[in-house]
Image (tube, rainbow, N blue to C red):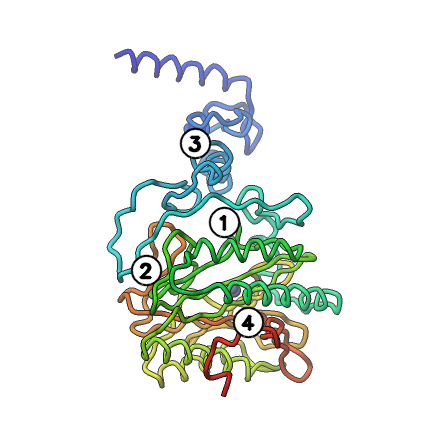
Amino acid sequence: MDQVKSRLRLLNAIMADVATLSCARCSKPANLQCPKCVELKLPREDAAFCTQDCFKASWSSHKSVHLKAKQSNGAGNPENEGWQYCLKKGQGRTPKLPYFDWTGTLRPYPISSKRVVPAHIDLPDWAADGIPKEEPSSDLQRVVEIKTPDQIERMRETCRIAREVLDAAARVIRPGITTDEIDRVVHDATIAAGGYPSPLNYHFFPKSCCTSVNEVICHGIPDARKLEDGDIVNVDVSVFYKGVHADLNDTYFVGNVDEESRRLVQCTYECLEKAISIVKPGVRFREVGEVINRHATMAGFSVAKSYCGHGIGELFHCAPNIPHYARNKAVGVMKAGQTFTIEPMINAGIWRDRMWPDGWTDVTADGKRSAQFEHTLLVTETGVEVLTARLPSSPKVYPWLDA
Ligand SMILES: [Zn+2]
Ligand SMILES: [Zn+2]
């Protein structure tokens, strides 16, 4: 009863207050307030609306203020929540293993606090609040940019740094190391080079790289799990430096890996090599998927469909969208000066995937293993330049490259 009374009092207070405010959408006198904003005690000016219609019409843009608030105050702030399990984007953390119909033997482990980025590092526009601003509404989601010589030079520099960062991660991979420790190596090496780890807080992603173990197709979150002898692990590194992004990944063997997994990883490596070999001006983007599918299916494997190669530059993800599977509907042809990634994910079993409760980790639906390789590429007048190519200093971890 007391609760009902205080509720009524609260409601009256809200109604009275609202009278002096104007609608956040149309500026007419406000009659109601977003209940979520009231609950979160957010600024009343942004929470007032004239009618339900105006409130509903603003919802898709308005709701982001709730996420922002959760991120920046207490609950949901990763900096206050070390070593807990990650929940779906922006929904904070939990101390208990979430319920899920796990598809394989891998499970999530708790994740560490958000890593600190020193003040002298240039930040992408999502670093502070988790929301990319320029990227979603940019024209470059439709048109494929032809990079200027200056942009290309900056891409070369950033891609070389990203390669060196990934190589630093590769050198520490062994049974017993946690993926969180790999993330620390990636984070520290990126910052030491003067760059920002692009994944950090991108759509609220909590870590500085992706680590995808065994049945994880992509976007695994570095956590407290120790790598085990026989695992495979993909490390996906992206760096923001001098205003442009670089993106690459490799899949590594942990200790002694079974024959089937070695075959899967080598086949995936070859899929990327074969795809790169067709890149030159005039080639259709949709051809990439045909080449990859042919090689993967010949080996008895399947191609994951949920994630694609992407344009990259001043934006982390933009046009073109490049599927890795056959009979895809990608439009357009390659032109000199374009920069994009190709990043096939090849599954030992079926192509279908499932998403873990963290909203990031994408796993195979049958729990069988998946491997991936990725490069950032530049289309040249005569062919292709692999901007993230291995260096003479890169660790020698693939037997088929030593022969
Ligand atoms: Zn990547
Ligand atoms: Zn990528």
Q: Is residue 76 toward the left or the right of residue 149 in the image?
A: left
Q: Amino acid at mark 1?
A: His
> Which amino acid, by three-letter code, is at mark 4?
His
Residue under label 2, please give it.
Answer: 354
Q: Dot 2: what SS?
A: strand
Q: Report the residue at 46% width, 40% height from top.
A: 78
Q: Secondary structure at mark 4?
A: strand
Earlier residue among tags 4 and 1:
1
**Residue closest to the eye, 173 or 361:** 173
Q: CA distance from mark 1 to mark 3?
A: 28 Å
Badge 4, how many Cα within 10 Å: few under 14, some, many 20+?
A: many
Q: Which residue is mark 4?
A: 375
Look at discs 2 and 4 and give the one toward the viewer: 4
- At mark 1, the secondary structure is helix
Of pointers 1 and 2, the one earlier in the residue sequence: 1
Q: Earlier in the sequence, mark 1 or mark 3?
A: 3
Mark 1 touching mark 3, by CB under 8 A? no
* Residue assigned mark 3: 52
